[in-house]
Structure formats: C-alpha cells, structure tokens
Amino acid sequence: MRRLNQLANSLLLAASLMLVAQSASAIVLVGPSGSGCPFTKIQDAISDILRRERDPAHNEVDPFIGVAGDNFYNEALVVDSTGVTQYIDPFGQQGAFVQIYGDYAQACADAQNGTTARIGAGGGKSGNSVLEIRGSSPVHVILNHLDMTDASGVFTGGGINVHPSAAAFLDLSNVDISGNHASFGGGIYVSGHAPGHTLALHAGTRIESNTATNDGGGILTNGETFLFATESNQVFVSNTAGGAGGAISFQGHGSMTLAGTQIAGNRASTGGGIYANADRPTDITFGDAVFVAGNDAGQDGGGITLAGGAKLAALSTTSPTQIFLNKVLNDTGSGGGVSVFGPAEMRFNGSITSNTAGYGGGIAAFAGSDLLMDVYVALTPAGPASPVVVSNNSASHSGGGIFVKAGSTFSTNGDHFIYATVCASDFVIDGNNAAEGTAIYGDLGSDILDTWGSTVALNFNGSVAGRLGCPPPAFQCAAGVACNEVNGNFRSGGGSGDGSTILVQTDSKLDARRVKIQGNQGAHALRSVDENFGMDLDTLLITDNQVDGELIHLDSADLKIVDSTIANNGIGAQHVIRASGHIDLLNTIVAEATPFTLDFAGNNNVADRNLDFVLTDPSDPTMDSASHVIFERPTFVDVANRDYHLRPYSPGLDVAPAVSNTRDLDGRLRDVDLPQIANVQGPRDLGVYELQSIPACSAPDQLFCNGFGSAGGQ
C-alpha cells in the first residue's frame, strides 16, 4: 500500500493530533503586535520552520506553531515543501512538517487556553486561498483550533487548496472552514496523484456555508485522494455547489470513509449532500452514525449521488446510516435520498426516510449507457432487530420508495443488456407514495435493437439477472420486530388504474420470498406490464390492501405463487388475479369477498395452468381445472389485527405433500403433521403459516382454548 495511505492509517489509529513532544522553548509562538511573541504573522512562522527543515543541520526543528487565539489574522498562508529533502518529522517520516494550533494565550506564554484563532483571506488577499499546500516534497500539515474564512475570487480551494505537486497529508481537528468562495472546492480542494493525498478530518471539524461556482461546495477531491472523517462531531452544513456535491464532491479515486458525520442543509445541482463519481473502482465506506439530512439537489440525488466506479458500503451494525428529508427540486429529477448511476454500486443497511423526488423518492438506480455499466443496490439488515428501512418517501411520478431502470445498447457481440438489480432482505418498505409504483417501480431500458428490464428481488438468495447475485440473508428477524413488510404505501397523483404498489415493466422480473404486503392503496398490489419474466412469489401474505382493479395483474408474463395467503383485500375488479401467461398457483389460500380467483385474460390453454392444493371460495368457478382444490373458507386467528395464522381445525391444515427443509413466514419448519387432522395428501398446511400443534383441549366446536378464538375469525 502506498506510503501516505499507510501513514494515514497509523495516524488515525494513533494520537496523530496530539502535541508532538518537544522542548517548550522550541515552540514557535505567534501573536498580535504588542504581545511579545517572536512572530506577528503566521506565514513568517511557517517560513521560518520550513527554512530550518530544508537545512540538514537543523534536523531537531520543532515544527509546532502556537498562535494566540481570539485574534483575527488576515493572511493568505502557504506551506511549500520544496527543498525539504532530508528532514525526518516526529512520526519518523521524511518530508516537510508543520503544526498550527490556534488556542494559545494572548500573553504569548507557552499555555493553551481553549481559544480559537481566526484566519481570513479577505480584503487585499482576495483571489487567494486561506491556505495553500504545495511543493515537490512530501508534506504533513496539522491544523487545530482554527477558523478559516473570507476567501473569495479563488479558482480552486477557497479555504484550503492542496496542490497535486506534493504528496500531502492534511490533518484537521477543531477547525471551522466557513464562508469561503471558489470556482471549485469552496471549502477545500484536494488534487492528488500517486501516491495520493490524505485528508483526515477529526472531532470538532466543521465545513459550513462555503460556496463553489462549480463542484464541491464544502470539499472537492480529484485524482488520488484518501478522505477520512471517522470521529464524532464532524459537520458539513449549508454548503452550496453550482455543479456536483454540495458538501462533498469526491472525484477521481482512492477512498472515502465517513463515521460520526453530519451532512445537512447543503445544496447542489446533483448530489445535494455527497457526490461520488470515481474513475475506477473506489470504496466509499460509511461507519457508525452518518446522517445525511435536509439536503437539496436541483436534478439528481437529493442526499447522495453515486456514479462511475463508486462502491458505497454503508453497513454499520451499531448506529446505521440515516438518510432523511432530502429533496430533488426538479420534477424530472431522481433519487430524493440516493441516486445510483451504473456501474456504481450501493450496499446499505440503514434507513432512507421522508425524501422527495420526481422518480425514486427514496432510491433511484439507473443502469449506465454501455456494456458492464450495470447498476446494483443491495439492502440488508443491520441485525435481527434492525431491518433496513425505506419509508415515507415521495415521488411525483414513479417509485415512491425505490425506482430502478435497466439499459440496453448496441453491441457487436450481441449482448445488448445493461442490468439493473435491486436486492432487499429483512426490510421494511412502508408509507411511501407515488403516482405509480408506490413502493417499488422496475423500469426497462430501450434502444432501436432490443429492450431489457430490471430485476427486483426481495429475500431472494440466488442468481438474478445481472452480473452480481443477491447476498444471502445474514439474519432472521427477531420476534416482534416489523420486518419483511411492504405496508401502507399509497397512490398520490395519477388516477384510477395508477398507483400499483410494486410495478415491474416489460421484460422485468419480481422475485419475492417471505414478504407481507398489507394495507397498501392504489390500482393493484402487484403489477407486471407486458411479457417475459413476470413474477415468482413464494410465502407471501397479501392482505388488507385496497385496489381499484385486480389485486395481482399481469398482462402476458408468467406468474408463480407458492405457499401464500391472499385474504381480506378490498378488490375493485371481479377477479383476484388476472394473468394470461403460464400460471402456477400452489399450496395457497385465497379468501376474498369476490368469489372469482383467476381471470385467464382469454388464454384458454389449460396446459398453461398448474393449479394444485388451493383453498378457495366454495362458489369459485375459475378453479375447475385445478387439482386438490378445497372449496371452503379458512378460519384465521385474528383478522382485525392482521393475524392470519390458521386456527386449529381450520380448512387448509395438513393438505399438501411435504417439501424438505422449508420454513413458513415465522421462520418455523413446515410439514408439521398434526395428529388430530387427517391428511389430504400430506402434512403441509396451505398458506404462509404452519400450525405447530393443536392444544389438547381443542375440539372443532370449542372456540376458546389456550388463546385461540379470542377475536373474530374469517
């Protein structure tokens, strides 16, 4: 690993910001006129230290500058490492080294008093950064207890400009960089080449109210940069960029690691809080307690925009990332919380709530414009009691919670497809709204040759369309924790026939396992437009939804429903399910007020129907071609409170053949043979739940026993 990245890690783990142990008399002191300090200008002290570091005879130089706090120093500072070729700094590294602390006493005694020195580049210093770091030798600069402000008319780096000429390590603690203006990098600009620059932000660092005409209101990095902000109380607030990245615009490559960081109230054209667009695969890591809140973007990524080779891993298990109350201001824009543009990737286990955009109120994921520019989003839980959350987001058009769009392109090798995949396991997707796809919208790409759709995989561990599969579920949700739910999403805007809860477009695929879909409102609960891949649904509980049309509607794609319970929905159409392609309906309960389960939409080919072990309405005429159909009504434990476990002796118990190593929606083993129930073809219960036992006192005519029958059944 490169020298500066090694140094960064060692300094971040060690006490890199502690006063280097030197004799007190060697500290260089700066104070206002009349203070008795050796220097009245910080620049003079910097120049004196660097002069001695260039001289091999002065290898014992103390590189520490103590500045009298509560004073304003109108200076444009420069640290130039040129000519420092033999000096060994206090950390054992060869290169220039300068420390500046702004918390020294006014009397210029060797005493720190917790004050802060203010350094500005206003007035006659207009056009200069507050601090420039440059030179041909490696350089390490530590700043502490400083306010850096008032730069204007600067091209790069209003507060701090780190030039590409030297391999620099910049360390900030208790530093406020505010009120600066530049064309690029209003607060800080870092442009690095191999072995790269390191920017380490520590506790008490604030980057606020800076402005960039172009990119990086707070910070802009280019080239090879390693950015660390991994301690508590690090704030990026109220920065503005005319281009990308209101708080941080991370471009080029290297790495970015954030923890204990607040990104709030920033604004940009894209990436209101953070914009990360890497020119090669680059790790973007969020640790504990990262908050991205209240940021605005004109077009995309109200909170965060990821593009190029950026690979975000926000996977804390202690205090996961929260992304909330961010907005995309343009009605055609996307990703109120996060926009991901392929080949960027996002792995996330926190919460994305109350964000707003035209498309993808919470998350928008777009495949790129060429081969291998797939987009990939994986949502996973932080722990058994901490599902990943996408809630209360709003899209004026499509994808209230999540919007995902594939791509296609001309290719001489015949591969036109650019994949778009969203995987989610142990999640809550609730309270989102949109005109269409209130929870999730899977869109297709198109060109003159072909089209290709998106893949939405919920609790699906296996191969999906694309070059990356879904990760295996890491946990099983803890008892009593709301989990694996698509609940309470609703239509906003649009009209009757719009607002399906999950909609996948042509050539798109929905794979869903062990999910509750309840209390949603709109056209349909599940909708597949046109042909090809359709829906594969296993162990779904679909209840208490209010829909204008059929509960499940597929134009011509295939539909498979296994081990599921569909009950107590308000359905505006005459049929529960409409599908004209191949239909598998297996081991499932359908208990609705409408007696018609299936509308085959004109497909009279009986070979396209695999209907077996279904419990349905006694008067249902659409199941005549089915095998092992039970025409009865089930009795559930507590419909009023959405408890759809079967009661003892309900129809649907011990009906279907056993299937090894499978579990119900509660995570319990299936195929429990109840000795009181005569099997139809085997011990497997129909629907999403497997009754584990029948209390000894139960009998078909006993309604109250060991907690069963305490509320109205169905």
Image (cartoon, rainbow, N blue to C red):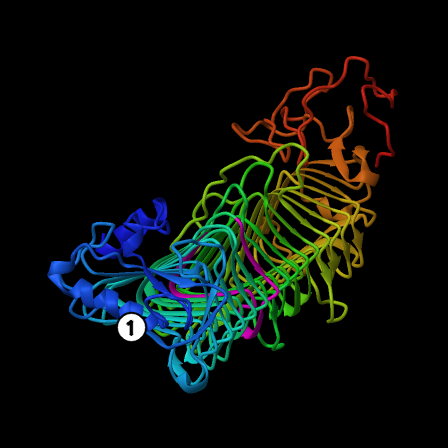
x, y percentage for residue 475?
Answer: 52, 36
Q: Which residue is drawn at 45% across and 59% down?
A: 105
Between 429 and 649, the one lying in front of the other is: 429
**295 drawn magenta:** yes
Label 1 Cα neighbours within 10 Å, binned few <14 / some 14-19 / many ≥20: many
Left or right of 390, for residue 545: right
x, y percentage for residue 516?
Answer: 67, 44
Between 119 and 262, the one lying in front of the other is: 119
x, y percentage for residue 683?
Answer: 64, 24
How many circles with numbers are drawn on the protein? Answer: 1
* Extent of the magenta region: 289-313
Find disc 1 in the rendering and name its residue: 163
Q: What secondary structure is marked by label 1? A: loop
Residue 49 image-quadrant placement: bottom left
In the image, residue 650 sits, relative to residue 434, either above or below, namely above
Q: Magenta region, mostly helix, strand or loop?
A: strand
Whether residue 348 appears in this view of the structure is: yes
**190 drawn magenta:** no
Q: Which residue is drawn at 54% across and 38% down?
A: 383
x, y percentage for residue 445?
Answer: 48, 70
Left or right of 339, for residue 673: right
Residue 183 image-quadrant placement: bottom left
